[in-house]
């Protein structure tokens, strides 16, 4: 049976979202079809609100509805946790173990994909180092994350900044985003110097 064109179009839009396969996209589309018109309007309005209101924090690069996010305004700036993506900030925040500020790179080094140091926010990190005592590099423990961590460590060490990396608890090849709070909390607390 052929899908109505409107449903097929919606399924295709959902399937373009990261981590959403065809079956999940189909379930999402059917859920929208089953919504009342008011619920669907609220859903659409929430999408528009995100696009209108959310930007990157001018300091850390995390998602924010203000120019400077609340974390950058309120937290200890002597310790900076460097992560690849905003979703990694959310993962570390869930642990409650980190009280410093963040720096979101918006990617990692990947020569195979043509992504070098100029394509991620390394220069912005270097500009933030005044008064920073420690930089925790919490990129994923995969090839790209490790390469990025080593590159940043080589830049920072000569500047006298302590550079650490989360230690045990996060297995090689896994994503920080999927680590449970206890594992990630232990990894942050028992970080090691690079």
Image: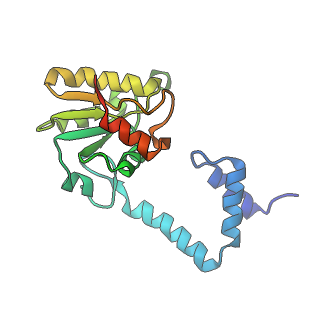
* Camera-side residue of 53 and 187: 187
- Image location of residue 101, percent across then percent down: 25, 46
What scheme was used to colour the molecule? rainbow
State whether residue 105 appears in this view.
no
What's the residue at 36%, 29% (across, down)? 167
State whether residue 52 appears in this view.
yes
* Camera-side residue of 44 and 182: 182
Left or right of residue 156, residue 63 in this image? right
Q: Is residue 150 above or below residue 29?
A: above
What's the residue at 35%, 34% (across, down)? 120
Residue found at the far left of this picture: 131
Left or right of residue 4, residue 18 in this image? left
Left or right of residue 175, residue 163 in this image? left
**Quadrant of the image containing the C terminus:** top left
Left or right of residue 182, residue 82 in this image? left
**Quadrant of the image containing the N terminus:** bottom right
Q: How many marks?
A: 0
What's the residue at 44%, 66% (across, down)? 49
- Image location of residue 57, percent across then percent down: 29, 51
Q: Is residue 40 above or below residue 134?
A: below
- Image location of residue 72, percent across then percent down: 22, 51
- Image location of residue 79, percent across then percent down: 20, 40
What's the residue at 67%, 54% (across, down)? 25
* Camera-side residue of 40 and 171: 171
Q: Picture quarter containing residue 106?
A: top left
Q: Picture quarter containing residue 51?
A: bottom left
Q: Picture quarter containing residue 117?
A: top left
């Amino acid at each position: 049976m052929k899908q109505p064109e409107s449903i097929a179009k919606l399924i295709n839009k959902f399937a373009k979202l990261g981590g959403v396969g065809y079956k999940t996209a189909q379930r999402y589309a059917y859920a929208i079809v089953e919504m009342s018109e008011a619920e669907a309007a609220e859903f659409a309005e929430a999408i528009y609100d995100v696009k209108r209101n959310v930007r990157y924090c001018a300091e850390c690069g995390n998602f924010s509805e203000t120019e400077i996010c609340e974390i950058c305004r309120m937290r200890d700036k002597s310790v900076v946790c460097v992560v690849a993506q905003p979703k990694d900030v959310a993962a570390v925040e869930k642990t409650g173990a980190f009280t410093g500020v963040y720096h979101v790179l918006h990617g990692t080094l990947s020569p195979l994909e043509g992504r070098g140091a100029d394509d991620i926010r390394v220069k912005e990190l270097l500009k933030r180092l005044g008064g920073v005592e420690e930089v925790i590099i919490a990129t994923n423990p995969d090839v790209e994350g490790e390469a990025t961590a080593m590159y940043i460590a080589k830049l920072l060490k000569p500047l006298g900044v302590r550079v650490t990396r989360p230690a045990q608890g996060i297995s090689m090849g896994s994503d920080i985003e999927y680590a449970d709070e206890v594992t990630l909390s232990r990894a942050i607390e028992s970080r090691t110097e690079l």
